[in-house]
Structure formats: structure tokens, C-alpha cells
């Protein structure tokens, strides 16, 4: 339990009321501050474990400004606000609070929010410790690798990626004139870039590169530079400017590592993201610096002065690169997707709840499947539940099971999906469509690790990891009373946002080729590839349905392609001009069945609720389910 809490609230009456609630619950309030300056004074003096933070405060600085400082200090905080301004709340959300309480407060809501914040803070600390322990073990094993230095350094880069995300990593030491650069080109794939390769890529002469090298600033302490700061640094250090320009980099983390044999070893982590590095990353790097120093010293100290090192250029194949991937059903190499893949590998090592956010068709189920497959639970079931497709009156029975006689059709006792997923993972797709009364029971599963069947009295203990997904804005759902705040923060321990396909432009053709191979094999078509005009057309499309829409387009196009190359794409139903004159006339039932199937595909077989097939077709859900039964359309 968190004992020491600071209240930062400009309304004294509200602050005193909150203090009374906390004192009654056994907490210690170390102070009340009405401005950022006053709060910082109390923090320095009393070092609170948690801060309850209003957004609007006295003075020029806001609670959001203080939140950024709290993140740097690794102090958990919960926002307090009566403001419903969406833009302001969105800005506050990006500071990654551990909770959000809306004024006026209820006693039980305050205590529950603090319990959840404590749980989430401990989970993040546990993740950091596991990450540190895992990295130290991997570094120790790398020390035993034989071969040229770049092979071992490549392994170091690969190990560091899981802990410190980067798009380009450069390693240089006082004892060696060679620079070792590792440009990320895929998951666990890096292009090795040494001095000669850098010269080729940049188009500079040897002398020009040497002149730039002279401006390299020998950093002596760990520091990070986000976009604006990096631009200033690049004015002094032309090597930073060169890297930023040719690789499109926007932020940098500097880590000097001291070794006895090689002097100082300089590690420069670069990212295409604007603001990915912070003081938390610095503290992590400083903790793993001793292990990193030992490994790098052994690698670089064994390097001979012979000119036997392999020169790599921009097209050279990496010695460690393989076609094997730990992921199934995920295709692409874009930077937004690589960030998701990094998240999957980290989330798979812990048991915390995961919340997958993103538009329809972005691949949320594939993310859940890969987290499960890479986790220690992979030998046990992964149960997928489409919450939107379950009728509200049956969802509890489906999830938790029921006893014989619990309701009219309950002719026998039945295990629920949570029991079927024991020791495994349950994926709750469309979690935003779960009724409020069921949300309470899901919260109990998360908090108490137990369920109760409908109509039963027995408490059944569960050991199930929950991964939830939605395309809804859950903060808005909470504000409008349709989703419980406490459940949201219990699920949102490890959140990940899946980018839309339009944000992954370089992956479109990779996906198109993947679906071409998949459906050409399925329909036994000898299609060798996609013509250039069609490839250009695919790149220009908007894809509101994301990956699922592209897959449907490719399947239809493969079906109707007759030659060796796919030279035309079919974005929807065939027009009369595209049908052969001998096409058979379809019955009303066939046309109706095709239409319902196409709508179900768009909705991912969601029938009930907002965005469901029943809503799009403007018919009652019961009418649609009965029509589907008549036409032989089975629910997925």
C-alpha cells in the first residue's frame, strides 16, 4: 500500500476533502500544494510515493508540466480534474498517468484508483527489473562469441534493442579508429555500417569524412537529445548532423562506457521518433553500464590490427541476418510496425494485462496471438472472444460459465471461456462493447483472480492472462458513463497502439505480395507477381479498413486474375462490365447472402452494438441472426 501521498490542487476545499478521505483510509498526506513550485519544494523535502495532481493550478505552469517532471523522477501520479475538454485530456494522457479521477470524488472511487495506480506502478517496476536481469545474462553469453568483432557487436546491438529502442546505433572507442554502426532494417535485422560504408552512403570523400570526424564531441556523461536539442547539437558535431540527415534521425541518447583496456567506449543511440529518450532510460542505461562495459571491453580488446575486417556497403548482407522470424501472421518492416514488434517481445516476458488499441483491421488479434505464443503460457490455450458478437444476455454465461438450471436453456453445467483458458491467455476483442454489469465481474477477475458461474455459489480460482482490444476511445466511453474507469486502468497496464495501414506506407507492397502468395496457393493459381501500374495503384489507396481491406482486395483480385501477373485489382463487387456474358443469374437469397457476408467482413463479424453489422444494415440484431441462420451463415 502507498503510504505517503502529495496532493497538488489549487482549490483548498477540494484538497482538504481529498485529504480527509485519504487519512480515513490510512494514508499519510505529506502536504498540499497549490502550484508547481510549491509541489516541487514538498517533493524535494518529503519524497512522496504518489502524487494526486490537478491539471489547472496557480501560476503559469500546469499539472501537465509537473507530470513531465514526475516522469523524470519516476514518481507515480494520478490526475484530478473536472475538465472535460477532449484536447486537454488527450494532452494529459500522453504524460502516461497511473490513473484519472473526475471531480467530485467518491470515497470508494479514490481508494480503488490508488490501489490500481499502485498495482500498475509495481508492474512497471517489475518489467524494468526483468528487462535488466535478462539483458545482463545475454551480454554475458555474448562475451563467449568467436569471430570478427562486428559479429559480437551485432549481437550486442540486437540485445540492447529490447531494452533501449533505436533505429541506428554507433559504437566507437578511444582505442580504435573504426566506427561500428548498426542501422535497423527489420526485426532483429541490422545493416552493419563501418567507415568505408558510411563514405559510400554519404557520397563524401575520405578527406571530407575525416574533417567531419574531427568535430565528434567526446561525451563524458549519459545524456539525451530530443528533436530541437539534437538540431542544436548537430551544429557543433557534424557527425551527428551527417547521421541525422542520411538516416532521418530525430533524437539521440549518449552513453559513455569506461573500460580499462579500451579507454572510453562511446555508444550513440539514435531514433526516428522525436521524443523517445528520457531520464528513466538514462537510469536504466547507467544500471546496465557495468555489464555492458565488461562485454564491450572483451570484444574490442580482442580486435587485431590486421586489415581483415569485412567492409560492408549499403547492399551487403548482414552476417547475423536470417529469414526466420519469431512472429506469425505479421508482415512488414516499417518503423511504426517495428515499435509494435518490440512491444510484443517485451510484453511476452511478463504476465501483466495488455490493452491493444487501434482502428478496425489493424491486426489486434495477431498481436494478442504473438504475445501468447512467445510467452511462458504458450503451451496452454489462447481463447479468443469477440465481445461485440455475444448477445448482452449471454455474455456472462459465455465468459464465466453457468450451472444447470441457472436459466431456461441451461440444461447442464457448462464451463465458461475463462475456465477453458486456465493457465493460458484470453483475448477479449471489442472490450468496449461489454455491458457495465459484466465489466464489474471482469474487474473482479483482474483483482481477485477468481470467477463465479452464473447461478453458482462456488468461487473458482483462475490463472489467466487477459489481453483486451478495442477500436473505441475508452477515455470518451468513461466520460460518457459507458465504461468503468477502474477496469480501464486495470487493463491498461501495458498499452499498445497499432498504426493504421496509411501510417505504414512502406509495408503496403510487402503485405500485398504476402497475400498474393497466400491466395495464389489457396486457389492454385500460377501468378508470378504484381504489375508495376497495380503496385502504384495499391500505394495510392486509402484503406479505411486497413490490413483486412487490403487482404480482401488481394483475395478477390487473385480469384479473378487469369494470367501470370496480377494486372488489375478488384476493390469491390464486380460490375456488370467485369462479369462475363455467360455469368449465371443469382437468386435473391444468393445476393442477400453475399451482401450480409461482405458487411460481416467489414465489421469483423461483429453483430451487436455500435459499428456492428446490424447497425450498418439498419435491422434489429435478432432479425439479422435469424436471417443468417436461414441463409446458412455461421457466426465466427
Image (tube, grey):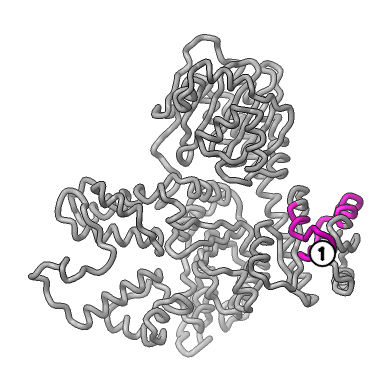
Q: Quadrant of the N terminus?
A: bottom right
Question: Which residue occupies the foreground of this view, 261 or 557?
Answer: 557
Left or right side of 231 for 558: left
The quadrant in which residue 11 appears is bottom right
Residue 141 vertical position relative to residue 434 in the rendered view, above or below: above
Horizontal and vertical percent position of residue 92: 69, 61
The stretch in magenta equals 39-68
Q: Is residue 121 magenta?
A: no
Residue 175 vertical position relative to residue 553 in the rendered view, above or below: above
Q: Is residue 47 magenta?
A: yes
Secondary-structure class at tag 1: loop
- Which residue extends farthest left? 582
Horizontal and vertical percent position of residue 375: 53, 51
Left or right side of 23 for 623: left
Horizontal and vertical percent position of residue 413: 49, 79
Q: Which residue is mark 1?
A: 57
Residue 491 vertical position relative to residue 396 in the rendered view, above or below: above
Left or right side of 396 for 532: left
- Report the residue at 38% width, 71% height from top: 636
Residue 597 vertical position relative to residue 496 in the rendered view, above or below: below
- Report the residue at 71% width, 50% height from top: 125
- Which residue extends farthest top? 306
Question: Which residue occupies the foreground of this view, 360 or 107?
Answer: 360
- Report the residue at 64% width, 63% height from top: 90
Say whether residue 147 is visible: no
- Report the residue at 27% width, 78% height from top: 593
Question: Which residue occupies the foreground of this view, 56 or 235?
Answer: 235
Amino acid at each position: 500500500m502507498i503510504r505517503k501521498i502529495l496532493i497538488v490542487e489549487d482549490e483548498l476545499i477540494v484538497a482538504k476533502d481529498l485529504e480527509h478521505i485519504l487519512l480515513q483510509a490510512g494514508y499519510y498526506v505529506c502536504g498540499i500544494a497549490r502550484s508547481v513550485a510549491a509541489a516541487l519544494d514538498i517533493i524535494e523535502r518529503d519524497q512522496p510515493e504518489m502524487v494526486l495532481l490537478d491539471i489547472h493550478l496557480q501560476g503559469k505552469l500546469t499539472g501537465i508540466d509537473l507530470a513531465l517532471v514526475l516522469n523524470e523522477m519516476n514518481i507515480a501520479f494520478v490526475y484530478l480534474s473536472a475538465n472535460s475538454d477532449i484536447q486537454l485530456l488527450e494532452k494529459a494522457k500522453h504524460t502516461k498517468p497511473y490513473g484519472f479521477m473526475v471531480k467530485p470524488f467518491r470515497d470508494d472511487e479514490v481508494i480503488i484508483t490508488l490501489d490500481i495506480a499502485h498495482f500498475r506502478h509495481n508492474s512497471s517496476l517489475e518489467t524494468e527489473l526483468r528487462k535488466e536481469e535478462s539483458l545482463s545474462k545475454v551480454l554475458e553469453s555474448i562475451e563467449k562469441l568467436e569471430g570478427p568483432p562486428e559479429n559480437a557487436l551485432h549481437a550486442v546491438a540486437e540485445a540492447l534493442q529490447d531494452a533501449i529502442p533505436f533505429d541506428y546505433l554507433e559504437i566507437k572507442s578511444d582505442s580504435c579508429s573504426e566506427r561500428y554502426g548498426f542501422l535497423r532494417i527489420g526485426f532483429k535485422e541490422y545493416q552493419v555500417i563501418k567507415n568505408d560504408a558510411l563514405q559510400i552512403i554519404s557520397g563524401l570523400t575520405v578527406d571530407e569524412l575525416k574533417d567531419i570526424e574531427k568535430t565528434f564531441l567526446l561525451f563524458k556523461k549519459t545524456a539525451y537529445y530530443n528533436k530541437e536539442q539534437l538540431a542544436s547539437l548537430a551544429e557543433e558535431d557534424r557527425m551527428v548532423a551527417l547521421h541525422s540527415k542520411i538516416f532521418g534521425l530525430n533524437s539521440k541518447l549518449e552513453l559513455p562506457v569506461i573500460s580499462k583496456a579500451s579507454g572510453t567506449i562511446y555508444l550513440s543511440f539514435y531514433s526516428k521518433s522525436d521524443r523517445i529518450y528520457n531520464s528513466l532510460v538514462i537510469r536504466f542505461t547507467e544500471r546496465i553500464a557495468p555489464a555492458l562495459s565488461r562485454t564491450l571491453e572483451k570484444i574490442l580488446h580482442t580486435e587485431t590490427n590486421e586489415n581483415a575486417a569485412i567492409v560492408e556497403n549499403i547492399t551487403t548482407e548482414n552476417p547475423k541476418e536470417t529469414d526466420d522470424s519469431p512472429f506469425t501472421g505479421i508482415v512488414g518492416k516499417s518503423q511504426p510496425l517495428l515499435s509494435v514488434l518490440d512491444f510484443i517481445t517485451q510484453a511476452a516476458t511478463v504476465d501483466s494485462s495488455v490493452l491493444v488499441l487501434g482502428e478496425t483491421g489493424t491486426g489486434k488479434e495477431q498481436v494478442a496471438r504473438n504475445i501468447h505464443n512467445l510467452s511462458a503460457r504458450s503451451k496452454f490455450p489462447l481463447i479468443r472472444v469477440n465481445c461485440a458478437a455475444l448477445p448482452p444476455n449471454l455474455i456472462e454465461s459465455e465468459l464465466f460459465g453457468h450451472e444447470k438450471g441457472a436459466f431456461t436453456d441451461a440444461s447442464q453445467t457448462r464451463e465458461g471461456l475463462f475456465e477453458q483458458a486456465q493457465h493460458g491467455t484470453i483475448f477479449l476483442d471489442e472490450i468496449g462493447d461489454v455491458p457495465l454489469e459484466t465489466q464489474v465481474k471482469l474487474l473482479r477477475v483482474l483483482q481477485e483472480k477468481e470467477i463465479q458461474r452464473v447461478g453458482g455459489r462456488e468461487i473458482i480460482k483462475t490463472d489467466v492472462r487477459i489481453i483486451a482490444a478495442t477500436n473505441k476511445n475508452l477515455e470518451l466511453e468513461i466520460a460518457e458513463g459507458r465504461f468503468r474507469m477502474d477496469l480501464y486502468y486495470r487493463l491498461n497496464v501495458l498499452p499498445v497502439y497499432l498504426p493504421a495501414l496509411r501510417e505504414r506506407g512502406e509495408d503496403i507492397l510487402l503485405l500485398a505480395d504476402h497475400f498474393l502468395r497466400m491466395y495464389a496457393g489457396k486457389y492454385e493459381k500460377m501468378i508470378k507477381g504484381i504489375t508495376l501500374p497495380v503496385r502504384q495503384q495499391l500505394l495510392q489507396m486509402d484503406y479505411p479498413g486497413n490490413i483486412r481491406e487490403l487482404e480482401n482486395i488481394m483475395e478477390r483480385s487473385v480469384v479473378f486474375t487469369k494470367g501470370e501477373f496480377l494486372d488489375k485489382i478488384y476493390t469491390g463487387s464486380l460490375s456488370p462490365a467485369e462479369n462475363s456474358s455467360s455469368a449465371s443469374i443469382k437468386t435473391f437469397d444468393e445476393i442477400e447472402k453475399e451482401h450480409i457476408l461482405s458487411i460481416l467482413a467489414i465489421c469483423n463479424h461483429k453483430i451487436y452494438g455500435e459499428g456492428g453489422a446490424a447497425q450498418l444494415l439498419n435491422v434489429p440484431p435478432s432479425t439479422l441472426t435469424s436471417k443468417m441462420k436461414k441463409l446458412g451463415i455461421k457466426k465466427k
